Amino acid sequence: MSASQSAVRSRAEAVKASRTFDWLICFTLFFVVLGGYHIHYMLTGGDWDFWSDWKDRRLWVTVAPIVSITFPAAVQSMLWWRYRLPFGAVLCVLGLLLGEWVNRYLNFWGWTYFPVNFCFPSNLMPGAIVLDVVLMLTGSMTATAVIGGMAWGLLFYPGNWPIIAPLHVPVEYNGMMMTLADLQGYHYVRTGTPEYIRMVEKGTLRTFGKDVAPVSAFFSAFVSILIYFLWHFFGQWFNKTDFVKAA
Amino acid sequence: MKLLKDKVAKLSFVALLATVTASMFYTPTASAHGEKSQAAFMRMRTIHWFDLNWSKDEVAVNDTMTISGKFFVFSGWPETVDKPEVSFLNIGIPGPVFIRAGSWIGGQLVPRSVSLELGETYDFKVLLKARRPGDWHVHTMLNVKGGGPIIGPGKWVTVTGSMSDFVNPITTLTGETIDLEDYNLENTYFWHAFWYALGLAWLVYWMRKPMFIPRSIAVESGKADSLISGTDKKVAMGFAAGTMAIVAIAMGNANEQYPVTTPLQAGLLRGIKSIELPVSTVAVKVEDATYRVPGRAMQMTLTITNNGDSSVRLGEFNTAGVRFMDANVAQDETGYPDDLLAEEGLTVSDNSPLAPGQSRTVQVTASDAAWEVYRLADLIYDPDSRFAGLLFFWDESGKRQMVTVDAPLIPSFI
């Protein structure tokens, strides 16, 4: 066999080789994306994702979608334009959540004994599914950015509410009112996380009526649109193969 | 010759591998005492912890202990550290080996950050409930915004029992009693597993069919539209609609199940009550202060004036949590950590009772291995070579008075 001859001798072999490539690429892509996305998300939205007493109605709802739409946008651009594969966002979030759960269970719980009901990650899956579907149905980056980006921001809090609602039940503790999440943060000592560092419920534009979360969600949705555009272009730039000479 | 070289190389490599493997199995216990890593000037001139008491040396899982005492917010607070306008009474333990069941400053519960004033003395108490068995070094600690953690003295406390027995019962305002240790855990696992499975289903739907090479060929030959079928679009719309419906229904159910919820509580606590200490009737002027580098002693020349109506004697010099005591005047009966207690570490050139109205200039030496071990001698490396501390005087009736000192400290190399 030489470089000028085909590596496969029949169509059946070609199909098998192609399928092997599929699994190899998927496996590698999954873990590479997991690593990169996880590090990125921890460095930008870290504490809001780590602790239940950081999951508020303002900063968590605003920051988490904005910093987490990044890799889904880039990976979508990579998988859609070349391959018309509409699972970029879900692939990213599956990787991220796997990495986060391994970290929370083995490290936060297994090593430092923080209870898992205190350090569980945020759920990003609803927004990821909708983002992928919008790209698939519209085939348009602009439409995905606007409609999908909005959905990404708006679905974040409702998608997580069934998980965090029980922790927002109030308690009276030694004469002060706290939520169960606040009490978790108070009880389970974090020497490196003094209470003043907790960036929750801060800011001026507070309510529309009495509800705070929708204001934050809409703001987050708008900024997610912009971030989607930016990172989609990052993805396209990284996907360039100009440096590979045609065979 | 080449054969010999190869053999040597091979053996060296094997030796290296063996060394690396052996070192991986050697795991000495790590017991870090982070307080020594903080700059000496910071420990001496920020928060002075005194009258500390660790209620127990040994406590079983689920039992409680307290750390109580006082802290003085030093008036000569260093400029290099932000003032304690936003501070948090924390506890220095290796993770949640205890839970903090309560913390109070001036009798007020302080689960949030507080504003403290320079020159004031506060009493504090932290209630800890044992959670994880082991030997733990338990420190007092105050976090200061813009300054970082100011760690106080630590004492070894042993927790016995089993962590699986730990419970943390809490009764909510809605009348339900829950165990905060594992409350809502199943619900969290359920929703995460559910959404993960849904995401996997979307992924598997596309991975069933050939992915990269065939689709790339199709796109490049202009047949991209053929890659998404009508069925694919219907399935996709089903996923999207289903996702939004599940989110809406689940949120509605959560609101029904938990109709009473409040936002996270945050905010600064002000108006923390300080202790009103009686005005000191002893005045102290630091004439000079030196320490030998390297060394274990600090000398100061003090002019002490007794403006009270009872004779006084100097019994203790407390700096950075290290207590230098004159055993003839005062002894510790609180079980203070041994490594921070120099029971006979204070020597005064003339420590006879100083009568009311009298003044005396004395040489005071604070000497103990703790000076070196706790890196107080490293003051030479700090950007502000000043020392500070608390002097405690006792009168004839055993009443104690506290006087603060704050003066330049000159190193001596001869």
Image: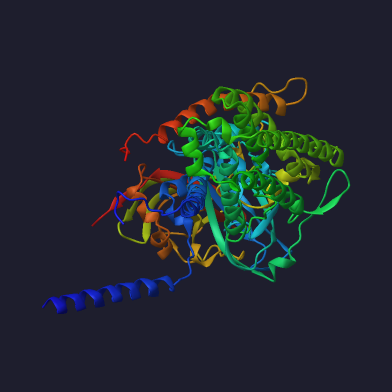
Residue B28 placement (x, y as % from top left): 45, 71
Quadrant holding the N terminus of chain A = bottom left
Q: Residue at x 58, y 38 (%)?
A: A89
The residue nearer to you, when weighing B347 against A129, is: A129
Is B27 located above or below residue B404 in the figure?
A: below
Quarter that holds the C terminus of chain A: top left
Q: Is residue B264 visible?
A: no
Front-most of residues B386 and B231: B231
Whether residue A73 sits left or right of residue B53 in the image: it is left
Whether residue B382 is visible to the viewer of this picture, yes or no, is yes
Numbered circles on residues, count: 0
Please name whichever residue, B265 or B298, is drawn nearer the observer in this view of the structure.
B265
Residue B267 position, x and y percent, is 67, 34
Please provide percent x and percent y for residue A220.
62, 27
Check the image and name the residue furthest to the left.
B1
In the figure, is residue A64 to the left or right of B365? Answer: right
Where is A200 relative to B299, above or below? above
Q: Residue at x 68, y 43 (%)?
A: B110
Indicate the quadrant where residue B266 lies. top right
Q: Residue at x 61, y 50 (%)?
A: B70
* Residue B2 in picture, x, y percent from top left: 13, 76
Q: Quadrant of residue B168?
A: bottom right
